[in-house]
Image: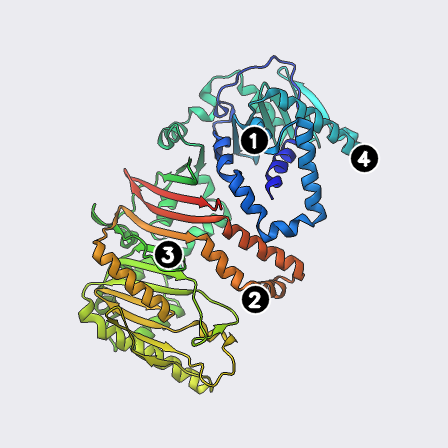
Amino acid sequence: MFGKVGILFCLLLSVVVFQVDAAAENPPPAAHWIPKDAVIYMELSQPKALLDVLANDKTLEAIKALPIYQKLKSNPKFEELLAAVNLFEVSLDTDWRTGLAALSGGGITFAVCPNEVVLIIIDAEDEQMLGRLHELLLTWSRSEAEKQGRPDRVGDAEYLGVKGWTFNGKEAHAIIGKRVIIANRPDALKTVLEMRGKGTEAALASRADYQAAKKTVGADAAGLVLMNMEVVKQIPGISKMLAQDKTNPLTALLFAGITETIRNSKSLALGLHVKQDKLVLQAQLDGGRVDPTGPAGFAVPGKSDQGVMPNLSAPRSIAAFSLYRDLHRFYASKDDLFGERTSGLIFFENMMGIFFSGRDLTDEVLAETTPDVRLVIARQEYNDQKGTPATQMPAFALILHLRDGEEFDEVVEEAWQKAVGLINFTRGQQAMPGLIIDRPVHNGTKFTVAYFSTAGLEQTAQLDARFNYRPALAVTGDYLILSSTDGLARDLIDAVKREAEAATGPLVGIHTLAELNGAELAAILRANYKAMVRQNMVKEGNSRQAAETTTDVLITLARLINHVELTVGAENELAEVRLEVRPCLQ
């Protein structure tokens, strides 16, 4: 796996063979050679800083210790990959990390322009190493072309004093000093070469949004991404995603404030910062703040001192979410938010009317909640008394902040017990075991739990999937906890009380907060390894080996991520998204 990074770069440059008759020059920043009409622009100005985080000794040792790496070592194709990396290192008299840094340390730039033009500019630090790599890849390219009976595939031509090369008559490449220029078409390369003699007026560097983005991300940014959102929003997949909140209430609730901002934005600027052991991506969109009086106003703080509460901490937490969502206002605006009432929405309203004894769902139920909505997903612990299901599902819980928990406690309790009763009635009609209700006490809070009994079972391992669920309801202080298990409910009772004692305040200006724990995600995936492999074989039609490889990759990706945190809010009238990733370095 560690060698894959090096060989990928090697293969990238293997499509370029370059020669220039002009004397070496010190070119301006790559943005001066990118056409002004670029739709997507990405620059990595500090590749070595990124390498230090993603390819340091600790990370590589962690990768080598992974099961998937041990499996790959015996794969003939992986052996060929390592052999290619070894050839790269021997030929250039360096190790792959040092070589990669020397060949790209000046920066990597990628741009997508109209008419499907793709440009890549790589600035090396070591011009001699670049030349040696050129000779190595040129020899290899000609040899391969001869074997295929297509020696004409490798050709060259001169334009404006620069000699460019192609491997298949489609892409074109050149080198000027320490700079490599790669284009997917010869005419695109000519455009870049022509810009060398022009001013900045025709270049991306002259655009106001580029200059503003450079200023916003700061001089210490390791990378920058700039997107023309007007064009990006026309991509079928993106446009479909942005339309889902008009038809799906859950999508509208979860992503409110985000989709509106994207729809209203013309430009997106994203900066990459490398800070010790973490990567921070910070994006700003010019769509402005969501109008608090508009349809999506239920999802944005209305006052300067409002925002989401920090996520609740629970043992074995896989993911946690904290949302600023005014549920009362959201449901009151449903007719404006959704053009037609679906059968699912009608069924939901009918059932809520039964559970809450005819109370108006908008003004008598959801009006009792504040805009503090939190969710927690956590890995479960099993024991002999509760049993261990064959497929282990994580526990999940919804935490709502009530305006008056003491007054609303029995109303929610009645609704919850009706729901359990309906489940038992339905299961009883099918001669299936029902739920047993209990009222235990934890940390001074009496709560309700329903569970399936294991009495009469000969063994408590490899149980039916229903034993993943022990639905629980708790009201502690002004917080309502609806959990899939009593274990998570107990943990959240403790978490809510700790938060109250600490007098924790909101994260001002933030309306969405999400966190992911990679180690716990990997643990739940490992616990269900056999089930996931079996499902992949049945659903995708893969062989067992292919299904195991797919599952191993998922677990590996989870293990390589220590912690991820996403926040969405607004700053200085600009929508701001911050993604913080801590790779696992152990």
Question: Looking at the image, is mark 1 or mark 3 nearer the viewer?
Answer: 3
In space, the residues marked 2 and 4 are separated at their CA atoms by: 46 Å
Q: Residue at x 56, y 15 (%)?
A: 25
Q: Amino acid at mark 2?
A: Ala
SS for callout 3 = strand
Q: What label does residue 119 carry, if any? A: 1
Q: Of 40 and 526, which appears nearest the observer?
A: 526
Q: Of 582 and 543, which appears nearest the observer?
A: 582
Q: What label does residue 147 carry, if any? A: 4
In space, the residues marked 4 and 1 are separated at their CA atoms by: 29 Å
Question: Looking at the image, is mark 3 or mark 4 nearer the viewer?
Answer: 3
Q: Around disc 2, counting alpha carbons within 10 Å, would you say few (fewer than 14), some (14 to 19), or many (20 or more)?
A: some
**For residue 411, which quarter of the picture?**
bottom left
Q: Around disc 4, counting alpha carbons within 10 Å, would you say few (fewer than 14), some (14 to 19), or many (20 or more)?
A: few
SS for callout 1 = strand
In space, the residues marked 1 and 2 are separated at their CA atoms by: 44 Å
Which of marks 1 and 4 precedes in the sequence?
Answer: 1
